[in-house]
Image: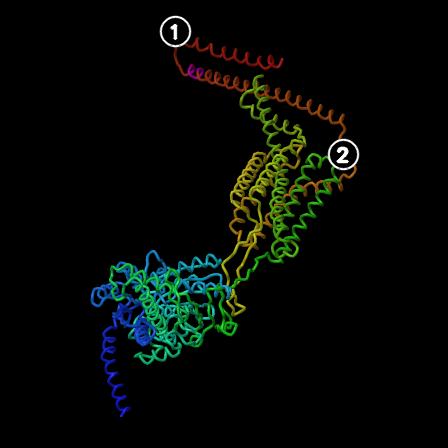
Amino acid sequence: MFQRRYISFSVYALCILSTCYLIPICSCVKDLVLAGIFPITGKGGWAGGVGCYPAAQLALEHVNNHSGLLPGYHLTMHYNDSECEPGKGITILYDLLYNEPQKIMLLGPGCSTVTTTIAEAAKMWNLVVMSYGSSSPALSDRRRFTTFFRTHPSANLNNPAYIQLFKHYGWQKINIIQEAEEVFVSSVENLERLCKQNKIEVVTRQSFLKDPAEAVRNLNRSDARIIVGLFYEKPARLVFCEAYKNNLYGKRVVWLIIGWYADNWYEVDPDKDPDVNCTKEELKEALEGHLTAESLIRNSNNVSTLSGRTTEQFFNELGSRLTTKPTETPGYVEAPLAYDAVWAIALAFNRSIQELAKYGKLLEDFTYSDEFTSQVIYNATQNTEFEGVSGRVSFTSEGDRIAQTQIEQMQDGHYKILGYYDPDIDVINWENGRPRDRWIGGKPPRHETLKYPQFRIVERFLFWSMVTLAGFGIVLAICCLIFNFTHRMRRLIQLSHPNINNLMLFGIVLCLISVILLGLDKAFDTLITNERFYMLCQARAWILMTGFTLSYGSMFSKIWNVHRLSTYAKKESKREARRSAGRGSFRNNTSFAEIRTFSSLVQTQKVESWQLYIVVIALLVVDILILALWAGIHPMDLAPYKFPPEKATDTDEDIEYEPVLWQCASPHDTIWMGVIFAYKGLFLIFGLFLAYETRSVKIKELNDSRFVGMSIYNVVILCIITAPVSLIISRQHNAKFAFVALSIMFCSFLSMGLIFVPKIIEIYRRKTEHSDSKKLEDSIPSREEEEKYQKLLGENEELKKQIQEKEEKIKMLQGRIKDRASERARLTLEYQKSKEAEQNVSSSSPKQAETSGENMVVPDRVEQKRHSDSALPSSTGA
């Protein structure tokens, strides 16, 4: 009985409690409403809402079923599809905000382009925004996005991982292709700054809006090897289709792209991607070996999270809610981020409720003008930290998620995890302690074709041939020096100024030595170090210019003095001719006397050796001054000239041979060469003019002047040809060396032959024919004999002048005799005519008789004229 009553009482009490407590509890649960925006449909962009919206719904169920979270509240969400379009997204925002019920916080949107617009406007309604799929680095700007948080790590977090990958594989040059979206533009700018800090060169940066064809072709033209690609999933298929068409893949190329695409994103659906003209197999071939980097959005520790579930359990539950296969679901990879975003909001609301209670306020009373409640929610979100299915969730002061970066590689069409980048210690932690990468060809691609320098050197046969000829020329010059020294006492040698000829021979030796120096190059780097090559460049210029000045300057000094003496003789001969004309000579005979006087004066002129030395020294001083200024201001050194690379035909490796020609060069060497060419050009042309002017002049004191003039002709012509041609063929090392060497040697051999061969022939001819008598004649005369010889020459000239005067007088008298004879003949002819006229008159009148009498007087006049003329020569002769 007691037991029955107890049971009845218990049932009654339970009914009372149900009536008093259960119904009030149900009526006290309040809704906390979120505004959700998800990119689910639309053309282009990221349709991650397909996978992220189910994850968010699953999170709402788990939060509402959690006993210790949001007591007395029920978290709900009103959502809409933004289609990843900024304009559509802002319209949806207005609809969600201005339609009941009141929204307390905003979840999403997933696309960075939409998030940028909405997050910047949300502060106008005091709304805190929690994004699950926006990675744009621009969203980290707290001055612009004051109430923004995200569980998706910033795209900039991938850039330090890229830098470590570049360092690991030794890539010093990269190329970038990006879609023209703000998220990618900001990320690329950050990557470029990091590359600059780490001395990694960004070779080219290409961008595209819709069609990536031209951008990919530009990458191919720039021979891109390491390519970083930043674009959404759909444009990615277009990019790699163009890469396949342009052969921008394989063992020489590696792509690094975003890692948050679906695992089978490259599988083409003709209905969804009609613009992609490549098959699945072609895209798979182009993608083989590429690397991806994405912030770690999956808890790799497989531990129980705040929701009481592991990551695997979460994905199992999510898979049952999807209408497509997980690998074919956009946003499936990012689903943990949406799930943890809802949990982060729930934790922030839970803390905000407690904080607002201190001030007697309720979270559900939030309005869009309530700045205080908005700040409380912001602070609670900022301090939120928990273990989620995407990993450890916490936020920086900019609202960014802190996370590691996962690095993967596609191998045989599947992504394999290589390691994780830890931003705290700036290190990549490889799986199993080392990267399990796999490359086409067995090794990672290089950032550029490996170029081996291939030194262009003078052919050895050509070099030694020229050296042999130059050595032979040096021996000949030494033989000529010996000849000059041996026969220095002979008059024939003395009158050619042997010391000047010795200077010329010494200059020729220097020029021939320069031929050897011009052929020395990198083939002799074992003997000549880089420091000595600097000295070699200086030696080439100094020796060649000094040798040219000594050799050509010696010939120039002789021809200069010949011209000087001939000019002096011409003036003196004109002066003597004017004196003769003043003594009665006629003008038509002056030129003959002038020539005779010029010839005699030229033959008697003396040439002092010091006059020749001064000319050579003056030219040498100018050369030394120019060379010293050149060496002091812009010294020459060995500089490489690189030719276009040549593909290696002896190996399949990515190797090119880069021909390099080492040449002596200096800053502004064109200016210095112009100065030297101008100076030497005037020097040569003036010498040519002097040689032409004195081509018919002979001077006893310079008995080889005609041969010197011939040598100058040849030297000038060869130099005028050699200088411009050597500049034109300066990159053709063999041709230039052969041409310059042959020109120098030809000038040297020709000059020695013209000046010394006639002397050698003459001396040895005299030796054989008049060995005894010519010895005396060739000996140097004494001072008394020289004075006597000069006196006899003076007397001979005086006698010649007197004979010239007598001959002129004789010619004058002969002229007068001819004039008288012609006058006499004229008078005789008149007389005969008058005689004939007299005989023809048959009769004469007295008047005619008088006329006849007068005409008879003519013979008497003629006779008188004859007598006077016959007396003239005898009187003149007396």
Which residue matches tag 2?
A: 779
Asked if the residue at tag 1 contacts the one at tag 2, i.e. Cβ–Cβ closer than 8 Å, the answer is no
Q: Residues within 10 Å of mark 1 (few under 14, many from 20)?
A: few
Crowd around label 2: few <14 · some 14–19 · many ≥20 (10 Å): few
Q: Please, is residue 685 above or below residue 794 in the view?
A: below
Left of 644 or right of it: where is 711? Answer: right
The residue range painted magenta reads 834-839
Tag 2: amino acid: Ser
Residue 144 position in % (x across, y down): 32, 57
For residue 361, what is the image quadrant? bottom left
Residue at 49%, 66% in the rendered image: 427
The residue under label 1 is 846
Q: Residue at 73% of width from left, 25% of height from top? A: 787
Left or right of 791 in this view: 682: left
Q: Is residue 528 magenta?
A: no
Q: Does residue 836 show up magenta in the picture?
A: yes
- Whichever of callouts 2 and 1 sits on the residue coming sooner in the sequence is 2
